[in-house]
Image (spheres, rainbow, N blue to C red):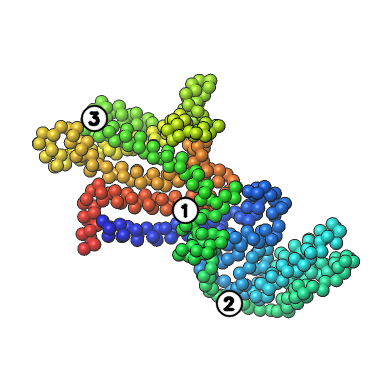
Amino acid sequence: MKRYLIRRLLFFIPALVVISLLAFAISINAPGDPVERLLSSGSDDGNSINDLNTNKQKEFWRKKLGLDLPLFYLSFRSKSYPETNLTFSNEKQQKALEKLAFSNGDGENAANFHNQRASFSDDLRQYKKVYSEVLWNDVMLHLNMMNHATDYIQAQQALNSIETIVKKVPEVRSLTWDSYITLKKNIQNGIRTDATINNLIPQIRIHADNLYHRWLFGDGNWLTGAGATYSKGIVRGDFGISYQTRQPVSEVIGQKAGWSLLLSLLSVLFAYLISIPAGVWAGIHKEGRFDKSSALLWFVLYSMPSFWLATLLLMLFANPDIIHWFPASGVKPATGYPADAGILEKIQLSIPYLILPLICYTYSSFAFLSRTMRVNIIEQMGQDYIRTAKAKGLSLNRIAFVHALRNSMLPLITVFANIFPAALGGSVILETIFTIPGMGYETYLSIQNQNYPMIVAIFTITGFLTIAGFLIADILYAVADPRIQFRSETNKS
């Protein structure tokens, strides 16, 4: 068994790598700027966007999210691309600097230009109070033009315009700061340099510290996570920050996954308790009255869409104008549980909220499970060991429910394994209809609000749990049928 499990685990490692790569590709190609989304959401301390949405704040968040790092361990770019890792306040500024580097083929000069204009901008802002509002707006306009310049001529024109404006301010008069002198020399050097041949020279670069590595292992020790500052990595359950609430995504998932897991477990339990006995009874009474009537009932239920039945049940049994037996939404009273409520009291309060969702979660499984069990029982009843049991005088019910049932369970194991991804993904439609605060409803809200860290986290964990479900199914197959384990052992010897 151990060798069998090790072999299966080794098989799943490449699948996990592929899932991580797909999730990473989704995260980096999501529309919009993640920094802008974070800054446009309300902060926990109540600060408004006007307090936070500054270039320094943007640069801080870009560094915190690792957006200043190369994407992967290897990059294939032209020689003119800057080798230095730079931090930008937005993606447009980054794209502009790349074009600036390609304009003359000197990537390092472009990197120096980026750092020097940042120092020059800081020096300018120290004198903000001595400018009139009109002049300061003009300074900021040309400074922004320089920040997004795609060649050095544009940068020179923007710097000259700023110098002209500064001369109008008596308190400043002229630019004598070191940052200005250095920046001006850099721009002049960029105008004189012509190394565009570098644009045609390919270069492979190795990046030990990159965004994928940060996303996967965090910014601390990749093995232990020690020394992590901004991220511990998804291997340690750190999926970043929610764009909506600025809470860690892992905390949100921890708060929401419980209800989806509970509904998944209960629906599978009730489906098995009803479908397995019904399938066995239909199998041992093939073509009988129960077999035909149950088949009709199961397929009628199976043909009804879950969202339609959910709406119908709410209209009939959660409607004050018709029958108000059950609450229409939520999982507990609107006022919450009483402060001194124990576990049993909480369960008692939540049961009315869960009955209708459980019906909608469970009914569609009846047809598949019961008919699968029926076919398997019919097949097993024709086996030699069943004939031997009959010859010994065992009752038909004992033969079916004790001997034939075990060998008929294999197809049902796969259904049980599906509970793991369903526990996280939940049912988006049903949880939205019943307003259940589970992962399905959270997925719907995340898609609606373009909360990409949450979407990527759900995709990644669901993929992992799907693989874990397959592994558990393999183990259960080996337990249910020793011949599977025997074949795997003999193939290795």
Residue type indicated by callout 2: Ile
Real-space Cα distance between discs 1 and 3? 46 Å
Packing grade of label 3 (10 A; few <14, some 14-19, many >=20) is few
**Which of the two discs, 1 and 3, labels the residue nearer the N terminus?**
3
Q: Is residue 491 above or below residue 333?
A: below
- Category of crowding for the residue at label 2, using alpha-carbon neighbours closer than 10 angstroms: few (below 14), some (14–19), many (at least 20): few
Among the two numbered marks 2 and 3 on one chain, the one whose residue lies closer to the N terminus: 2
Placement of the C terminus among the 4 image quadrants: bottom left
- What amino acid type should be assigned to the residue bearing mark 3? Glu
Give the residue displayed 23% in from the left and 27% down from the top.
Answer: 288
Q: Residue at x 56, y 60 (%)?
A: 230
Reply above or below: 84 against 263.
below
**Residue located beneath label 1 in the image:** 460
Q: Do we see residue 44 in this rendering?
A: yes
Residue 82 horizontal side relative to residue 405, left or right: right
Asked which quadrant contains residue 390, the reply is top left
| Earlier sequence position, callout 2 versus callout 1 | 2
For the residue pair 57 and 114, the one nearer the viewer reads as 57
Quadrant hosting residue 335: top right
Q: Secondary structure beneath disc 1?
A: helix
Which residue position holds label 2?
A: 201
Identify which amino acid the numbered label 1 is placed on: Thr
The residue identified by callout 3 is 287
Q: Residue 287: horizontal and vertical position, in percent?
A: 24, 30
Q: Alpha-carbon distance for marks 2 and 1?
A: 37 Å
Residue lying at 57% horizontally and 44% vertically, measured from the top left: 448
